[in-house]
Amino acid sequence: MRQILIVDDEDDIREVASLSLEATAGWNVLTASSGMQGIAMAVEHQPDAILMDVMMPGMDGPTTFREMQKIAAIAHIPVLLLTAKVQGVDKRRFSDLGVAAILFKPFDPLTLADQIVEALHWNRSAPSPELSRPEVPTLRK
């Protein structure tokens, strides 16, 4: 089962995104309400991907991403930025950071998992590679 970390300072966004990814994709979702908390949780839990808001008080999404890139233990984790900003200059600035993708608010809870799968080129039906287990035969009566 894939594990996603959502980093957003808005409770409603974290809740809707969490419920969406759990219900539509069956993923395990962790949440953090700040960049610093997100970094700590990423180091501890090693999620498969991080969905992070751009505009957060204290440390914003781009700054948090740059800090994550300095930490070898989590630098490999793909980060998708979530933003309400849609101007071309912002899109270029965010993509120049090296994030995996930029998703836009408001997002559709029914397609959020599909957007992540597509952006990261994941196989939707496959579990995380490190969690794959051999098939166990079932007994029939």
Image: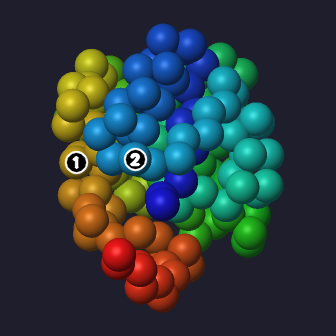
Q: Position of residue 48 (x, y in %)?
A: 52, 61
Mark sitting on residue 114: 1
Residue 92 relative to residue 26: left or right: left
Residue type at numbered disc 1? Asp
Tell me residue 136's x, y (percent): 46, 83
- The kind of secondary structure element at disc 1 is helix
Query: How packed is label 2: few (under 14 Cα within 10 Å), some, or many (20 or more)?
Result: some
The residue at the point 47 percent across, 31 percent down is 18
- Measured as percent of width and height from the top left, residue 23 is found at 35, 35
Q: Quadrant of the C terminus?
A: bottom left
Q: Is residue 14 left or right of residue 83?
A: right
* Residue drawn at x 35%, y 78% as measured from the top left: 140
Q: Earlier in the sequence, mark 1 or mark 2?
A: 2
Q: Kindly state the secondary structure of the residue where label 2 is placed.
A: loop
On residue 26, the disc is 2
The residue nearer to you, when weighing 18 against 11, is 18
Image side of residue 79 versus residue 69, left or right:
left
